[in-house]
Image (tube, grey):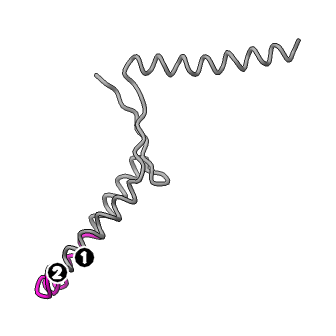
């Protein structure tokens, strides 16, 4: 008899979990997971550096004098810090969304 009760409780818990999920979805509440954000940020930074390097020696020298590389690194680090505060873990950002 205890095995039957344990199985019944397990089934009820799993059904309640899906029922709660369906109710939240019908209310327009859900979770969205954005993955690959850190990879995208590194790719964008590398693309900016490659475009600066491909412009020619005068533009590259001017970018070096103006410390453009340092500015890009500071901006990318600030954006990544903001994402970490928002909940970025392991390159994935999960947030709750509500459709009004």
**Which numbered disc, 1 or 2, marks the residue that appears first in the sequence?**
2
Residue at screen point 37% across, 52% down: 83
- Asked whether residue 41 is drawn in magenta, I would say no
Which of 50/74 is in front?
50
**Disc sitting over residue 69 in the figure:** 1
Q: Residue at x 40, y 37 (%)?
A: 32
Q: Quadrant of residue 44?
A: bottom left
Vertically, is 43 above or below 8?
below
What quarter of the picture does the C terminus occupy?
top left
Asked whether disc 1 touches disc 2, contact meaning CB atoms under 8 Å apart, the reply is yes
Q: Is residue 63 magenta?
A: yes
Q: Which residues are magenta?
A: 56-73
How packed is label 2: few (under 14 Cα within 10 Å), some, or many (20 or more)? Answer: some
Query: Label 1 crowding class (10 Å Cα cut-off): few <14, some 14-19, many 20+?
Result: some
Name which quarter of the figure residue 29 lies in. top left
Separation (CA) of disc 1 from disc 2: 7 Å
Disc 2: which residue: 63
């Amino acid at each position: 008899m205890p095995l039957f009760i344990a199985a019944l409780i397990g089934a009820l818990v799993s059904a309640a979990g899906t029922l709660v999920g369906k109710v939240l979805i019908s209310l327009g509440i859900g979770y969205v997971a954005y993955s690959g954000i850190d990879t995208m940020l590194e790719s964008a930074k590398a693309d900016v550096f490659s475009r600066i390097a491909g412009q020619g020696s005068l533009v590259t020298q001017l970018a070096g004098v103006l410390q453009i590389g340092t500015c890009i690194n500071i901006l990318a680090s600030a954006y990544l810090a903001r994402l970490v505060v928002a909940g970025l873990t392991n390159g994935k950002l999960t947030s709750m969304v509500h459709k009004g």
